[in-house]
Image (tube, helix red, strand yellow):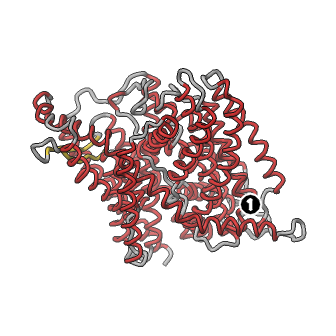
Amino acid sequence: MNLPTTAHPKEITVRGVILGILITLIFTAAQVYLGLKVGLTFATSIPAAVISMALLRFAKTATIQENNIVQTIASAAGTLASVIFVLPGLIIIGWWRDVPFFITFGACAIGGVLGVMYTMPLRRALVSQSTLPYPEGVAAAEVLRVGTTSREGAAEGSAGLMAILLASAASALYAAGAASKVLAGEISTYFKVNSSGGVSGMAGSSSLALIGAGHLMGITVGIAMFFGLFLTWGVGVPVLSTWTIEWAGLVPHLVAAHPDPAVAVGEYAEGIRSSQIRFIGAGVIGMAAIWTIGKLIVPVWGGLMSALEAGRARKAGDVDLPRSEHDLPVWIVGLVIMLSMVPAGWLLFAFLSGGPLSQLALPLVIAGVLYILVAGLLAAAVCGYMAGLIGSSNSPVSGIAILAVLGAAVIIGMIGYKFTGPNVETALIAFTLMVTTVVLAVAVIGNDNLQDLKTGQLVDATPWKQQVGLIIGVLAGACVVPVALNLLNNVWGFAGDPNFHAIDVAGGTLNAPQATLISTLAKGAIGGKLPIGLLGIGLVVGAILVALDEGLRIASKGRFSLPPLGVGLAIYLPAGVTSPVVIGAVAGWLFIKLVSKLKTRDIADRLGVLVASGFIVGESLFNVFYAGLIAGTRKPGILTLPHPWSEHVGMWLALGLAAIIVVGLYLWSGNQAKKIGDTMN
């Protein structure tokens, strides 16, 4: 593989498109599972680039631009899957029993295509002529340049692919051990803290995927989530369990009546967390997301004005632009946007057809299409700028979703507030969620598009070919989202679903934290059912955390911070999900510290990232496969061994094996980095 010496290097090729689509299909399924479990997704550009380079290096004519198209296509998996932050809300409110394929595919595809179109006019101002850092785009470009221009890069590409494969296999086998009950699925302990009903505890899922997610998030977010755990289990649960009237004094009774006293205390503690603490966490998340967006209003506005000025300054046809400046023609962009409104209108009409809002279909569809057109444009522009400023993974998509659902709820509620009848309120909430899904798809793909275009600029790619590649990735990912979401709903389901019909009830429901929050906000905005008191406490806590974060940043001159969104997520999510993420963040930090003395520390760092990505992909894909196995056989716990050993033994085995796998693969990564450096000396 080599850098091109011609003016027209290979970029979009049949083999590249096929490889990009295959990676997108695999990674999208993994992202759907991870997002439903923990409320987070991971960037797929770098793993996709490594896989592409490792496979295409056997083709003599492969170029860096061809590899770039592969990662551009596959990057859609890391972003489009974010629609699951809204879509499960339609199940949670009882509007859907199962996930319809075509409506879900349409929402993802229409929103994704619009996300690409809306951000294309911003490319010159926000990418080519901008000083924005684009952290992930620059990192992906560096991986591509190193991997395709040197023998050291080729060796790293091979080691990177092996890192993904080894970590994926280890993670899948570990997840299979938990599914078979050889390993404990969760390690937990709960206890009383006083004689007045106060309880606390701690839990952690046996999950290498969550450890990998922690590594990718980094130590700063890990510390923030640890602080959130402390606020929840060190303060919130003990205090509220002591003060809450309906629970006070019941712990002794529960313990006496329950065959396992420890389980009784655990159920009590989790009851307090799920009924009260998580709404406080929702308030913290809302405050953190809105604050983040508020801080970016001025730079986003400046960026948009710069884009408009650049557009006016260009004289169409007067300049012979180089290949690296060729976008899709403006008339095609405008035509695609206008034509997209037709299927968008059909999608919304089909969603309402036959329901209690059929008589209001015309005004609701018109309002929905206009909202997608206008709010989608604003969301794409804001997210695109934030991608350049702080990166796609750190972009506060939750905040965009919160603002989008509240705006849609106000407009839709105004249209339908006088309309009465059975299920009308639920139908209005459901329509609000569907419109928000499309807007969110626009936002997240807009977020991704500019990041990819930055990578393309650095490797001398053709912008319009990248834009076409991303649309291909959007369509491929849109095929997977409804299938994976429906499968996981049927096997494990979501808490609060009135039509709950999960096959494997003992396997535990999926958290879908953002979807639960977004649907709660939609209900509150339309039906006035928000738990105002608890959300208000969360907003106050969030404001304090924002002030603390800003103070830390100022006092340390940017060296330290305490991201409020990370704290809020830890308050909102169960400890079983959060604590492994914290452990992964600490483990990743220790690994980076240990390899920092190596001459090839950058290679070791990148291999560590790929190991963490492999942990996520392996476990997530196993659980999607496991869900398919359960759905096909209708046998929950089909992998459970007949006579597994005690749970206590399973806990120790889970801890020991996880430590061996994580430490072993980190050591392997460091050794591989040394070997790559030695071969070049």
Q: Residue at x 53, y 38 (%)?
A: 87
Place of residue 245 in the rendered image (x, y in percent of width and height, measured from the top left): 20, 38
Instruction: Specify few, some or many for label 1: CA neighbours under 10 Å numbering under 14, 14-19, or 20 or more.
Output: many
Residue 67 in sight: no
Q: Quadrant of residue 350?
A: top right
Q: Quadrant of the N terminus?
A: bottom right
The reply to whether residue 250 is in sight is yes
Q: Nearer the viewer, residue 585 or 401?
A: 401
How far across and down, in percent of the image, does residue 515 sit?
A: 48, 41
Q: Quadrant of residue 357?
A: top right
Query: Which residue sits at x=39%, y=47%?
Result: 535
Q: Position of residue 680 (x, y in %)?
A: 50, 75
- Amino acid at the residue labelled 1: Pro
User: Residue 192 in the image: x percent, y percent?
Assistant: 14, 44
Residue drawn at x 36%, y 38% is 176
Secondary structure of residue under mark 1: helix
**Toward the viewer: 568 or 25?**
568
For residue 650, above or below residue 64: above
- The residue carrying mark 1 is 121
